[in-house]
Amino acid sequence: MKQIPQELKASLRKAGFDRTQVEIIVALSGAEPLSIQDVAQLVHLPRSSVHLSIEELVEKGAVLVQKQGKRRFFYIDSPLRLRQIISYDETSINERKSILERTLPELQALFTISRGEEPIEIEELAGEDGFVETFYRSLEGGHAEILRFGGEAEKFTIAREKLKTFREKREKKKIKVRLLLPESPFAEFEKQDALGKSREVRSISKEMYNPDVQTSIFGDTVAFTVWDKGLHTAIVKNSKIAGLLTSLFNIAWQNGK
């Protein structure tokens, strides 16, 4: 077998080639196409080990194959071909990273649950459609009640057409609503309109309560809608946060009229 400096072999090892691969590369460098048996004899390694290593080098593009009938012969046409290994590994690493990034959220959720922790899921919506979606989403999950911190009822003039079927669906599901509003003539109208519709409205003095954010609490979810030009909504899913907001709602409810 041709002699090659040990320093060169060491460099190939540092580049990521294992011992068998290094010996195969040395044997095939500058040689005529060789069979697996020929290579195994040259490197003094088991034929099975040589076969596995050569097949891997072929798959990664570092070694080429020449067929003669049913027999295969292997060769390296240029040392530069070894770069194919790095390119192949880079692609493989990127694919593994992509798969891992997609898997990590599920693993994180499993990890926190196993430790008795609960993840906080946050979703952002925008515009009238996002606002409407929070209403219909509050009908999902099988909970019995929706709690709402409402703003000035006079401001609630958007999406009325899109919400026409909301009350019908809510009543069909037998989901009750409790709504807090700042005191106003319109709030008084809302109180009367709610009678007999599985809906109860109370009001609080505007000096104490007059938010520009509507907050809905249902199950383990809280939805905050900011009354700005973009009508931005943040949906937070976490039972502890929902529990805190429920407690605050009940405190305010007791002080409502």
Image (cartoon, rainbow, N blue to C red):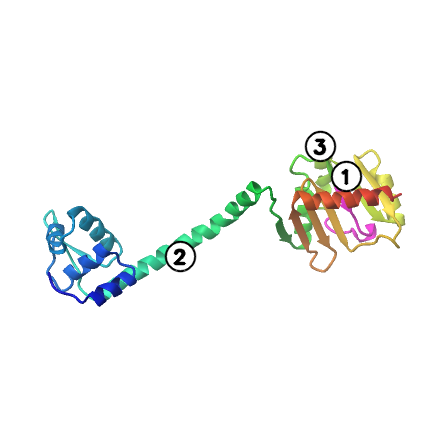
User: Which of the image's four quarters has the C terminus?
Assistant: top right
Residue 190 in sight: no
Q: How many angstroms separate mark 3 from mark 1 (CA)?
A: 13 Å
Q: Is 241 placed left or right of 103 in the picture?
A: right
Q: How many angstroms separate mark 1 from mark 2 (CA)?
A: 50 Å
| Tag 2–tag 3 contact (CB < 8 Å) | no
Q: Earlier in the sequence, mark 3 or mark 1?
A: 3
Q: Which mark is residue 177?
A: 1
Which residue does the numbered mark 2 point to in the structure image?
Answer: 94
Residue type pointed to by label 1? Val
Q: Earlier in the sequence, mark 2 or mark 3?
A: 2
Q: Which residues are magenta?
A: 147-159
Which residue does the numbered mark 3 point to in the structure image?
Answer: 172
Q: Given this view, does label 1 or label 2 mark the residue nearer the observer?
A: 2
Residue placed furthest toward the front: 6
Q: Earlier in the sequence, mark 1 or mark 2?
A: 2
User: Which of the image's four quarters has the N terminus?
Assistant: bottom left
Residue 47 in sight: yes
- Residue 148 part of the magenta-drawn span: yes
Check disc 3: other Cα within 10 Å, few if <14, some if 14-19, many if 20+: few
| Tag 1–tag 2 contact (CB < 8 Å) | no
Q: Given this view, does label 2 or label 3 mark the residue nearer the observer?
A: 2
| Tag 3–tag 1 contact (CB < 8 Å) | no
Q: Is residue 17 positioned above or below 146 on the image?
A: below
Q: Position of residue 112 (x, y in %)?
A: 57, 45
Q: How many angstroms separate mark 2 from mark 3 (CA)?
A: 50 Å
Q: Given this view, does label 3 or label 1 mark the residue nearer the observer?
A: 1
Residue at 85% x, 43% y: name it: 202
